[in-house]
Amino acid sequence: MDKVVASAADAVADIADGSSLAVGGFGLCGVPAVLIRALYEQGAGDLRVVSNNCGLDGRGLGQLLAAGRIARAMGSYVGDNKEFARQYLAGELEVELMPQGTLAERLRAGGAGIPAFYTPAGVGTLVAEGGLPWRYGADGAVAIASPAKEVREFGGRSYVLEEAITTDFALVRAAKGDRHGNLVFARAARNFNPLCATAGRVTLAEVEELVEPGELDPDAVHLPGVFVQRVVALTAEQAADKPIERRTTSATSASSASPARRKAGA
C-alpha cells in the first residue's frame, strides 16, 4: 500500500516512446513540473499529450515541446506558447482543440468507464461538422482534418457525440498526499488534476506535503488513492517553485485604503 517512490526519475522510468499522457494543470497553476522535468531528462519522445494547454515557452510541458518530444497534443487553450503555435502552423505538431468543458468531461468519462457522451457544445460548428485542421503540411495546406461527429436530437435540442479519453499515464500535482495515494488539491490547482488522474491507467502524483495514512480527513480527500499508483514527495524548494504565468498589479485606491488611512486623509 505504500506508493511512495524514491524519486521523480524512478516514477517516470517506464514511460516509453509513443506513450499517451494526461497532464494536470492550467497555464502554470497546478502543473506537475517536477515529473515533467524528470520525463524530459529521461528522454521519451513521440508523446501523445492531453492537457488543457501545453505550458509556456520553457516551462511545464513547454520543455518537452521545445525539445520536439511531443507528437500530438489534445487540449482547449494555446495561450502565450509561441513555440506551440509555430510547430502547429509548420506541420510539426498534430493538435486537436476542443471546448474546455468538453475536454474536462471527456477525461472524467474516461476515468468513470463511460465510453462516450452527448453534449450541446460544438453543435453547428467545425467541432461537430469536421474540418478542423489537426495537422498542416509543409506547404501550409491542411494535411489531416477532424472527422465529422454524430449529432442527435434529444428533447428538441441537438447534441454532438464525444468519445471519452483514457491515457497510458497521468501526471498530476497535489498540495497534500499520503502513502496510500489519497490526494488533496489547493484551490485553483484542483483544475484538471483530478480529471487527468482518473483518466490515466498509471497515475503519478507529485505532492508538496507527504503525510502518513490516517492524517488526512477522509471528507477532505479530493481524489481517493485507488486512482494513484505512484507518489513522489517534493522537497521544500520544489514545492515552493510556483511561477506566475502573467503577473498583474493595480494601484491602491482611496476606497480600498484602511479606515485609519482614510481618516487621516491618506
Image (tube, grey):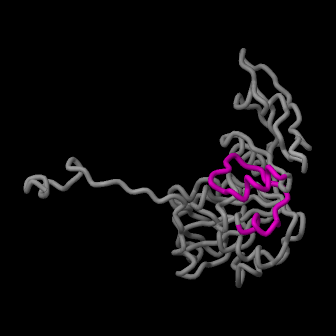
Q: Residue at left 7%, top 56%?
A: 264
Residue 165 visible (yes or no): no
What percent of the width, then of the height, locates residue 83? 72, 59
Q: Quadrant of the N terminus?
A: bottom right
Residue 44 location in percent, x, y? 85, 72
Q: Residue furthest left?
A: 264
Q: Quadrant of residue 32?
A: bottom right
Looking at the image, is 119 positioned above or below residue 248? above
In which quarter of the view is residue 46 placed?
A: bottom right
Q: Is residue 74 magenta?
A: yes
| Foreground of the two, 90 or 5 | 90
Name the residue at the top extreme. 156
Residue 212, compared with residue 74, is above or below; it is: below
Residue 17 in sight: yes
**Magenta residues (range):** 63-90
Relative to 240, 51 lies left or right? right
Left or right side of 247 for 22: right
> Residue 48 in the image: x percent, y percent?
83, 58
Q: Position of residue 110 (x, y in %)?
A: 78, 48
Is 186 on the left or on the right of 41, as rendered?
left
Foreground: 199 or 145? 145
Left or right? Give the position of 118 relative to 18.
Answer: left
Q: Identify the image quadrant of the C terminus.
A: bottom left
Point 79% across, 65% down: residue: 202
Q: Nearer the viewer, residue 14 or 111?
A: 14
